[in-house]
Amino acid sequence: MTFKAEYIWIDGTEPTAKLRSKTRVLADGAELPIWGFDGSSTNQADGHSSDRVLKPVFTCPDPIRGGDNVLVLCEVLDIDMTPHRSNTRALLTEVAEKYADQESWFGIEQEYTFFKEGRPLGFPIGGFPAPQGGYYCGVGADEVFGREVVEKHLDLCLEAGLKISGINAEVMPGQWEFQVGPAGPVEVSDHMWVARWLLYRVAEDFGIAATLDPKPAKGDWNGAGAHTNFSTKAMRENYDAIIVACEALGEGDKPLEHVKQYGHGIEDRLTGHHETAPWNKFSYGVSDRGASVRIPWQVEVDKKGYIEDRRPNANVDPYVVTRLLVDTCCSALEKAGLV
Ligand code: ADP
Ligand code: MN
Ligand code: MN
Ligand code: MN
């Protein structure tokens, strides 16, 4: 007997990478082999030397096919078995290991927008729906669009064993959110990429495209972000560590270094309107949804907990945002003697 392994990888498309996958049929009990693909079709190689390598790094049950079938998330390597330049996971694992003793946790809020027939789901042909106001966490056929896909996606993520922690309808019609976490940097990112793949895959069955476009509708409509909630062991125990992390994110070139790598098109989303802070002006504050980084109200009361970086775009690479946060905050906490 056989089973099917769906090999999933992140391609080299710029400015925003896409997910790719293909199926390998394997004999029952077989180990998941290293595999290859044509990198010239994925912006990962030139035609004359186009073989690239898929190295399995995270496996879970395939809830679409069921049975013994599996999803296999891979890193992309060059044929000399070193990480391909598009392989941001390899960069993260190094930094994550360096600061492993600080026990970083992440919860990422993935916002996204459904499109059908070239417009956001719920937008009428050639026009606009009623202005924003009733859609966020709404109920009823006049307020929410695509719930059947969202419910199915949640069930699939749970069946796959992903650490999905919730869903909600967002501020713009056809816009939704799911959250993954809390989990360590590599785990939350692997789960996020597989959850994204499952989202595209299940929406496909409904004739709907899910997109991570950070500004899917021009005008007075909210963009789509990926708020990244972050804590270390020290931050979960004391408030000084919370403040050190916030200050570190605001120091010197750090705001720009982070924002530049928080997803293509970030200037169009971080305008200072629609619950965002301007991309070129760093701020942090308690309960402040107009700040770059928010300290949740409860965290100030408890004097411990986590912070929310509200800047990342929906199209951010989770391997990149978690690496930057660990690197910036954990090194500052170390320097401050708070670990
Ligand atoms: P919001 O109120 O901003 O909409 P959500 O409830 O959508 O927040 O998401 C919060 C995320 O933060 C969840 O994924 C949750 O698991 C995660 N989270 C909770 N506690 C921590 C923590 N201590 N460290 C990191 N992430 C956390
Ligand atoms: Mn949320
Ligand atoms: Mn949201
Ligand atoms: Mn949030």
Image (cartoon, grey):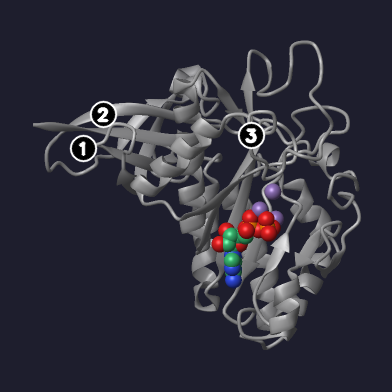
Specify which label sits upstream in the sequence, 1 or 2: 2
Relative to the observer, which residue lies in front, 69 or 298? 298
Category of crowding for the residue at label 1, using alpha-carbon neighbours closer than 10 angstroms: few (below 14), some (14–19), many (at least 20): few
Report how far apart the C-alphas of labels 1 and 2 lie in the structure. Answer: 15 Å
**Mark 3 belongs to which amino acid?**
Gly
Q: What's the mark number on residue 24? A: 2
**Can the viewer see residue 323?**
no
Residue corresponding to mark 1: 67
Q: Quadrant of residue 146?
A: top right
Residue corresponding to mark 3: 140
**Mark 1 belongs to which amino acid?**
Gly
Q: Which residue is rendered at x = 44% and y = 46% of the image? A: 82
Q: Position of residue 332 (x, y in %)?
A: 71, 76
Report how far apart the C-alphas of labels 1 and 3 lie in the structure. Answer: 35 Å
Quadrant assignment for ligand 1: bottom right
Q: Which residue is rendered at x = 84% and y = 31% of the image? A: 131
Q: Quadrant of the C terminus?
A: bottom right
Q: Are marks 1 and 3 in contact (CB under 8 Å)?
A: no
Q: Quadrant of the N terminus?
A: top left
Horizontally, residue 75 falls left or right of residue 271, namely left
Q: How many marks?
A: 3
Specify which label sits upstream in the sequence, 1 or 3: 1
Q: Is residue 65 above or below residue 58?
A: above
**What secondary structure is marked by label 3?**
loop
